[in-house]
Structure formats: structure tokens, C-alpha cells
Image: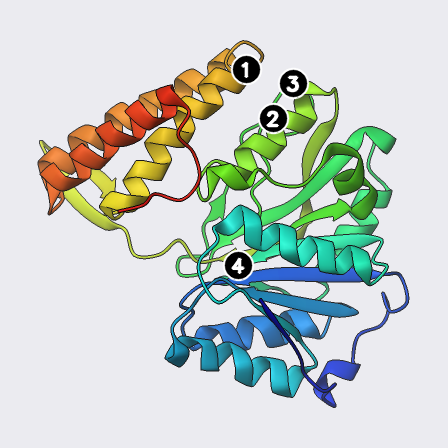
Amino acid sequence: MKVRMGEQSAGAGEISPQQGEGIAAVVVTYEPGPELIGNLKALRLQVERLIVVDNGSSAERREIVGVAADTMGIELIENGRNFGIAAALNRGVQRAMECGAEWVFLFDQDSRVTPGFVGAMLRAYRGSRWGERLKILTPQYRDAETGAVLPAVRAKEGIAIAWTSGSLLRVETLREFGLFREELFIDEVDHEYSLRLRRAGMVLDETEDATLLHALGSPARHRLLGREFCVTNYSPVRRYYQERNKVWMARHYGRSFPRFVLSRFRMSLSDVWKIVAFEEDKWRKLRHCARGIVDGLRGRMGKLEL
């Protein structure tokens, strides 16, 4: 793991009104595109410390992150290889703790904050009706391409699940309830942390006062029997993690949150027929789904070794 510090740029000096409040943001990157520069620049203007954790990008893509680190006053942690989203988040969070941060924002590389985002999130958190029970606050999400609002799933108290990107936590929450489960590697990481907090009687919530522009990738749309379907076209390896980790979640949270677990398996059934009907490399994807289910039942976790 290599840590690289960039020099503070003139543009990055526009931080206040939150300056001095111990605010850090952690962004995880993996094979980012050139749009990352704009996303980081928008965020750097609003936070005291910006930590980017690159999770084993190629040399060409890593250079994009390096340029941002050198010109925007960003701290770059280069993992050297892909340790998974949970491990990368943990490295960034641990660095924020070492630097004395009181608050930490978590972001994906393809999300962009809007003006005033950080201040609005902090005000909403402090003014929440849930008081000390609030442990994660999320913004309102908008599709960066269409502008459509992506609604949160409501729970009896607050929201059911907090997405990682744009979420705000107190550092003391991470100390009290622990870090992210690295054995999940990718997928269900944010779901697991959300249910961990809710099972302890804590609350997650969202605010409409802050908006995050979130890129959803490029799902394909197909029509069948007069209906339109959205197809994600995830890789076989990604399918493996999705199904394996859903089984893991069922084993650990099925009794506490049966409706949530059942909804995830209903999604799996929907995904299977979409793979068969619309996607390429369908049989390899289905084999990886099956392997994921078997490994989830056997408790084989961590990175998939091909």
C-alpha cells in the first residue's frame, strides 16, 4: 500500500463554512474515467480533507487519480491491487480517524456533489428528529443523466438501507459499531452495515436538502410482450458476488429482516430470467450465480479465486 500526498492547490482553499469541523471524505476508485477529475474537484471545494483510495487500477487509469492528487491537495492511498470495496472503504476511514476527523463522507467515483452539499448534510444531521439514534444520513439521489430522483426505501423508522455513496457518518459510529465486512468483498457491503445498525436499534435516514448526482452506468433496455425491461449486464464474476453475498445476508440477518432478505432473492429470480432472455454469455453468468449460492451456503467468502 502506497500513500501519496498532493500539495494544496489554490482552488482547494475555498472550503469554509465547514473548515475546522474535522470533516473528511473518502472516495474509492477502480479503473476510473476522466469524469473523476470533475467529481473530485467539486467535492474538494467542500471538505477539509479528501482521501482517495485506489483499489488496484491499471497504470493508465491510476494516472488520472494521480493528477487529481497532485493538483487538488488530495491524499491518495494506492492499494496496488483490488482488495474489494469494503477493504478500500476501511483503509480510507482508518486514515480519516488517524487525522482526527469527527465526520466522514463516503463516495463512489461516479458520484458528484452539488453546491452546498456538505453544509446541507451536516445541518440535516444535527437537526434530525432522531437525535443520537441517527447513525447514517444519505442525500437525495438523482440520476446524473436523466435527472430522475431515485427514491429510498422507507422503513418504520427512517429508511431501510443507506447507500454508501454520499452517506454521512460520525467517526464515533464506526468506532462503536465497527468497520465494513471485508469478507463480502463487493456487493451487499452497504446493506450489511445498514442492517447491523438497525438491528442495534439505530436509525438511517435521508434528507431532501442535499442532492447527489449519481451515475447508474449504462443498463440496456429491452422490450418483450409490450413491456420494457432494464438489463444490467453485470459480468459473471459480479454475478457470483451478488448471489453469494445474498446467501450470506440471509444467514446473518434473515431472522431479523425476513422481508428484506426475501426481496433480495426475488430480485435474483428476476435477474436470472433477464440473463436468459436478453444477456450475452448467459451460461457462464448462470454458472457463476450457482457457484456463488453454493459458496454462500458453505461460508466460502473473500475474493473469488479464478
Q: Where does residue 212 sit, x and y in percent of width and height?
A: 58, 56
Residue 24 appears in which quarter of the rendering?
A: bottom right
Image quadrant for the N terminus?
bottom right
| Camera-side residue of 158 and 31 | 31
Count every numbered label the image shows and give the total.
4
Instruction: Tell me the kind of residue under disc 2.
Output: Leu
Q: Earlier in the sequence, mark 3 or mark 4?
A: 3
- Nearest to the eye among marks 3 and 2: give it: 2
Q: Percent position (x, y) of residue 136?
A: 71, 39
Mark nearer the N terminus (1 vs 3): 3
Of badges 2 and 4, the one in the foreground is: 2
Precedes in sequence: disc 4 or disc 1: 4
Q: Secondary structure at mark 4?
A: strand
Q: Secondary structure at mark 1?
A: loop
Q: Which residue is mark 4?
A: 213
What kind of element bears circle 3? loop
Q: What crowding class fits label 4: few (fewer than 14 Cα within 10 Å), some (14-19), or many (20 or more)? A: many
The residue identified by callout 2 is 195
Residue 99 lies left or right of residue 64; in this view the side is: right
Q: Nearer the viewer, residue 143 or 162?
A: 162
Quadrant in the picture for residue 3: bottom right
Secondary element at image label 2: helix
The three-letter amino acid code for the residue at tag 1 is: Phe
Q: As shown in the figure, which amino acid type bears the numbered disc 4? A: Leu
Comes first in the chain, label 2 or label 1: 2
Depicted 221 relative to depicted 201: above or below: below
Residue 257, image x and y in percent?
54, 15
Q: Cβ–Cβ below 8 Å for labels 3 and 4?
A: no
Pointer 3 or 2: first along the chain: 3
Q: Which residue is mark 3?
A: 156
Reading the image, the residue beneath label 1 is 257
**Mark 3–mark 4 distance (CA, rounded to whole Å):** 27 Å
